[in-house]
Amino acid sequence: MIKLSLSLVAALYSTNAAQVYQVIYPSFNESFGDAVIFKDEPDQAAGGSDLIVGCNNNMQCARSLLHFDVNHLPDDAIVTDVQMTLLSAASVAEEDPSMTMNLHQVTRPWSRTTDSIPDGERDTWVESLAGTAAADGDVTWKYAIYPDSEWATAGGDVDDEVILTSVESKGWSDRASPLFFPMTDAFRRLVQGWIDGTVENNGVLVKRDADEDPNVVGMRILFHEQSGNKDYRSPKLLITYTSESRPEQMPSPPSGPGILLPGEPTRAPTTSAPTPEPACPITATGVEIFTGTSSQHASIFKDKGGLSQDKGAFGVGIVHSGEILRGLIKFPVVSIPKGSTITCAEIILQTTGPCGPCKGLVDVEMHRITSGWTTTGTNDFLAQQQPLLYQVELQGAGANSGDVTWTHSTYDAANPDGGGTRWGTAGGDVDPLVISMEVDDERGQHKFPSSEGFVDAIQSFVDGTADNHGFLFKTEESDEYVALKAEENSYKDYDTAYRLFKGEDEEEEAERPLLVVHYTLPKVVAAAPTSDNVPKSDPASTPPVTDNSAPSQSASDAPADTAAADTDPAPATSSALFGMQVYCSIVMVMSMLAISWSY
């Protein structure tokens, strides 16, 4: 049922509303889903497999239909940006001609079942392209709903206007990037109509730009909405809108925040809750603020005493190579004055890696390291041959002398069994107290916020009551946790759940690890005056002061201790010299008389 338009009314109130981002899939809510129809094949359908657009080498052609349900969005939503993405499911030779795809509004309801799929394996479709026998309720080239409701025009009832055109799709030899359909005013108006109910939502049809030319070869195979239940592969509608009635951040489907691949131009949602503010803002007032990056970092590999990694990014969690990693990092704080009082401490790390979906969801905890460890800064993760991604495999290299490993805080490559310095406990000597847990903030940035234990750790480093050996990051490592993460993340069967954090050797300074500490300086207490720290006046340079307001007081009139304290020793010294002079004069006179008498 078509509702009255609310867009004009909502526009009057949306000027200052926050931008909200939403990812919508064809499988979401009451969507028709997606399907393939095969040119001039009225009884063939494909509603349960990859999407196909274009013509193969034998001029067998196909189009794809998609439906995005937007009924869950607020009626007063005002669309400010909307794009669509498709992800290629099969590579195309680099020498093959490029092509673009056009999007049209479908004007008639249709349906599909998931029982029908293209005939044969994906690799054979370039030469032989056909669907399977249509079931009741499937969409085909002739039928909108098989076998009872026909299209008015074979190949789908659509508006003639091209409302979106994809970017150019060229051949490639490696992993594909998402294929974007950038926003147009026509598509924005269409989606706005779907939301406010002024336009019936029958989805869209995708066909090749040269669809009507039987002599042009070019076909693309694309992931559909049921590609192994992996939402990151699905076609996506990327909507940004404002809403007065529901201005809060709306969550995308369950895997929404983690499915956006690199290169998508619209910022992904972070969480259904407001973005957490920094625990220790670097612009705070009323406190001293320390900010500094790390001096060393490393990854250690569970139960692998001979592996190390201490160059580039460091890993934490469960990786595809089967390893479980822990990360170590140290921040010098010697520039914080001793005696200062720490009030807040926070670590901010930036993540990296080429593969968002493969990382999975993971909880990272932080502990204080209680004994020293060393690094050489020479070992990065081992490079992997394509199509493997080295920042997914995260395989360690053979440890050098001086590296930290799972078994050694300082490894000795010449004598692995008896040399070097071993941890007291394999995996690192740490305080068991979890002093911080990772908090996701902006995409790619992760905070380890302040806590009482975190503040106490920094305070002990500053006071010197504990040596600063840095911090260790780890996840839960039980078999049950590993199995849970494998079930949650089935991307290419990677079974991964990890973080890959940039280190202090990152080229961009703003991307390096950051420790933020708030503190107050120690109070300076003035020393009580003593005879040693009270300056004495110089009689030669200080003129005498006469007090005419009261009779002068002689030393004998004053109390004994006062007289002793205030009497300058210079007069006594002068008297002694005078007495000596008199004595010497008498002696000389006596000597002269004695001489005269002797004569």
Image (cartoon, helix red, strand yellow):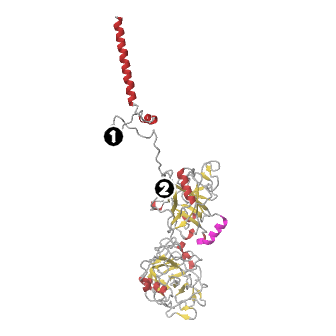
Residue 484 part of the magenta segment: yes
Label 2 residue SS: strand
Q: Which residue matches tag 1?
A: 548
Outermost top residue: 599
Q: How many marks?
A: 2
- Label 2: few (<14), some (14–19) or many (≥20) C-alpha neighbours in 10 Å: some
Quadrant housing residue 115:
bottom right
* Pointer 2 or 1: first along the chain: 2
Distance of mark 2 from mark 1, alpha carbons?
51 Å
* Residue nearer the viewer, 258 or 530: 530
Residue at 43%, 87% (x, y): give it.
161
* Residue nearer the viewer, 282 or 300: 282
Q: Tell me the amino acid under the disc marked 2.
A: Thr
Q: Which residues are magenta?
A: 478-492
Outermost front residue: 551
In the displayed structure, would residue 445 be above or below residue 519? below
> Which secondary structure is most common in the magenta stretch?
helix
Residue at 55%, 71% (x, y): give it.
357
Tag in front: 2 or 1: 1
Percent across and percent down for residue 523 are 48, 51
Q: Which residue matches tag 2?
A: 520
| Numbered badge on residue 350 | none
Percent across and percent down for residue 420 are 61, 48
| Image position of 422 (left or right of 107) | right
Q: The C terminus lies in which quarter of the figure?
A: top left
Whether residue 499 is visible: yes
* Residue nearer the viewer, 332 or 44: 332
